[in-house]
Image (cartoon, rainbow, N blue to C red):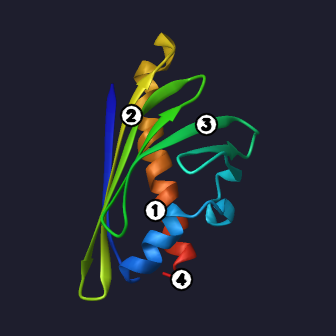
Amino acid sequence: MAVSNIKAELSADIEKVWTLITSFDGAWRSDLRGIERLDEKNFVEVDKSGFKTHFTITVFEPYLLYEFDIDNDNISGHWTGKLSAKNGRTAIDFTEYITPKKLIMRPFVKGYLKKQQAAYLRDLRKALGE
């Protein structure tokens, strides 16, 4: 299993950050074609190439904690997003726990996660006007 974490402080208030990261509008994400909401707890992200990843929300505590399980043909895992308010700003702490399903992918998973998290944070900052 590979574990990757990213922490940052954003200038936006916690309500705005929470609303954006929990929305099913993936338009702000540069890596996605779209998000298909299946029901209250399940959704599918479709990347630019059409590859689909299924997510199941496991924890939804507004403005505090958001967690989901991740599954596609290549990986399975879990994502945890913690938020906290600091003087009108928002601290984020996002951690992914990913297990590759293919042996050949093991050496590359950690680097891939770091790249994905950096792109997510960059897109998040841009969507928040930072």
Q: Which mark is residue 110?
A: 2
Does label 4 or label 1 sit earlier along the sequence?
A: 1
Instruction: Find the residue positioned furthest to the front.
Output: 40
Q: Are marks 4 and 3 in contact (CB under 8 Å)?
A: no
Q: Which residue is mark 3?
A: 53
Does label 4 or label 2 sit earlier along the sequence?
A: 2
Does label 2 or label 3 sit earlier along the sequence?
A: 3
Q: Which residue is mark 1?
A: 121
Helix, strand or loop at label 1? It is: helix
Q: Are marks 4 and 1 in contact (CB under 8 Å)?
A: no
Disc 1 packing (10 Å; few <14; some 14–19; many ≥20):
some
**Disc 2/disc 3 C-alpha distance (Å):** 18 Å
Q: Nearer the viewer, mark 1 or mark 3?
A: 3
Q: Residue at x 53, y 40 (%)?
A: 55
- Rendered location of residue 61, percent (x, y): 34, 61
**Disc 2/disc 1 C-alpha distance (Å):** 17 Å
Q: Amino acid at mark 4?
A: Gly
Helix, strand or loop at label 4? It is: loop
Helix, strand or loop at label 2? It is: helix
Q: Which residue is mark 4?
A: 129
Relative to 122, is 44 above or below? above
Q: Are marks 2 and 1 in contact (CB under 8 Å)?
A: no
**Disc 4/disc 2 C-alpha distance (Å):** 29 Å
Relative to 31, is 26 above or below? below
Q: Amino acid at mark 1?
A: Leu
Relative to 125, is 48 above or below? above
Helix, strand or loop at label 3? It is: strand
- Rendered location of residue 19, percent (x, y): 50, 72
